[in-house]
Amino acid sequence: MRFRSVIREWIVPFAQPTLFAVIPPVSLLAANLGELTGIELLRPLLASLALAFFSFLMSWLILRDRARAGIASALATVLLLSYGHLYDGLKTLGIPGETLVRHRFLAPVLIGLGLVGVWLIARLKRSGEGGLVIVVVGLSALVLPVSSIVQYSVEAQQLSPSSTTANVQCDLDLAPGDQAPDIYIVIMDAYERSDVLRAVHGFDNSSFLDQLRDLGFYVADGAMSNYRFTVLSLSSMLNMDYVQAYPELYDPNGRNWWPFAQMIRDNRVRRELACLGYTTVAIDSGVFWTNWDDSDYYLARTGDPLRRVGMLGGVSRAESLFLDTTFARVALDAVRQTGGLGLPGGLDPDSMHRETVLYAFDQLSRLPSLPSPKLVYVHILSPHPPMVFGQEAGTRGIGDFDAEFSSDDQTALRAYGDQVAYLNARLLEAMQAILQSSPNPPVILLTADHGWAERDAEDKHSILHAYFLPENGALALYPTITPVNSFRLIFDLYFGTSLGLLPDQSYYSTLDDRFNFRLVENSWLGSGDS
């Protein structure tokens, strides 16, 4: 009897807010499997639990009854941690919703409802049974996201990308007397092709491309990515084959692309070059699943171990997503309307993103001094939104990483073009520094993983794609070459292989049906766009 009494009087009351504090971060992780990790949501989880404890303590002090305090604190936890979802949901109601749903109205209404709820709870005659029902509801709400996480994790363990290493023959070779060139892979996330920049954004990128050509680059004016998603594009490029070539990993009806994310770090290009004694150099991108954090030289702006497990440092993308679903959305939206002014840098996701991008450029220019031969891998999450750079490096803070923009959002379209203009200047500085400081002419692949504009599927695949290939290597290039062929060509030119080229094809899919591909035609006609 005493055990039952403990459960009824202590465990059930406190379990109510605790369960509803756990649900939001767990659900966010389940909705972003393969893109977020549990460690990234550790601080949101701890903050949610702290909120639950504080709300339970305050409710207990006010109501003087643990059973009622459990129900009241559960209500407060739900309202505070679901505010952003409620706000976004009401925004979708159409013109009335867009007009009337404002924080200045919704926040007081929500607070009022909470106070009314507490008043009603204080007058409950039998609160014990209600508390047990709430616990059951909370546990039930956790079943689906936890099941999704477990299923995804089990599938990821069962699917092994070992086929990539099986293809490594260590048969790269150099002609007698030849020196192995340094190889740079610089990936600009969502950097569009020149003709799309002009048509969609009204931005003329010809000056930048001409300056690249003056440095000796070949610009593939009609290039398209092989896939529309970063995971698939990078794994395909770095393993020199289409993802469909790995039947043990590829399932047209599947959703688990974690094995292909693993193939970004453990890839054929890297392993083949390791056979020749290449060291690897990588710069932190800010996204764990594209990082080569096991490189010989791994450069990260936040190298402190506690920062890297998310216990210290500024707000990450995952935490920003979480905060936007909570009552903190009120303050965050107010700050965004001022362009981010007034928010400490460590609490401003745009500021953190800006610093990560700038750090990458600063380090990129210094890498030639590291020992050769080296394979340098740099993935810069820009010009992909958020738009945090103006043409003069001014801050903007337009959109966020997961924002969707309509094709008639002129403010966002212009901001993207301005961001490209700023990045172009930094890219030229970095490319000049690499070429001037390298002891021997390097091989440089400057490319994008996919486009950004989405008038149609072709827009989403149209990319910046440029090569610096010494010793007349550019003679083997052509305007519509795709990334899957980049290292097949580089290895054939400089390392004595005979891999040959695959057909240049682009495959479109959606996030909900990510492996159900359809071919995308490349309508580029070489009409002089550059």
Image (cartoon, rainbow, N blue to C red):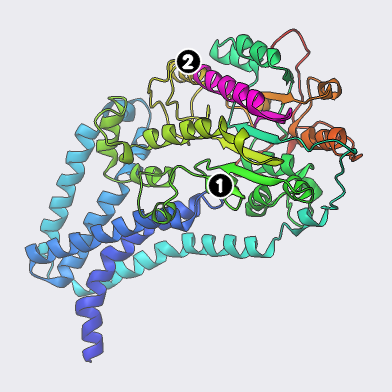
Which quadrant of the figure has residue 100?
top left
Closer-to-camera residue (196/74): 196
Where's residue 448, x and y in %?
A: 64, 30
The local secondary structure at tag 2 comes to: helix
Instruction: Name the amino acid, label 1.
Output: Tyr
The answer to whether residue 380 is visible is yes
User: From the image, which quarter does the N terminus lie in?
Assistant: bottom left
Q: Is residue 444 magenta?
A: yes
Horizontally, residue 128 falls left or right of residue 319, namely left
Q: Identify the residue position indicated by label 2 in the image.
A: 414
The answer to whether residue 449 is visible is no
The residue drawn where x is 54% and y is 65% is: 150
Which mark is on residue 298? 1
Magenta highlight range: 421-449
Closer-to-camera residue (456/425): 425
Horizontally, residue 18 falls left or right of residue 139, namely left
Where's residue 198, x and y in %?
A: 60, 11
Instruction: Name the amino acid, label 2.
Output: Arg
The residue drawn where x is 43% and y is 31% is: 354
Q: Is residue 331 magenta?
A: no
Horizontally, residue 493 falls left or right of residue 35, namely right
Where's residue 247, x and y in %?
A: 79, 54
Closer to the chain start, of discs 1 and 2, is 1
Closer-to-camera residue (225/136): 225
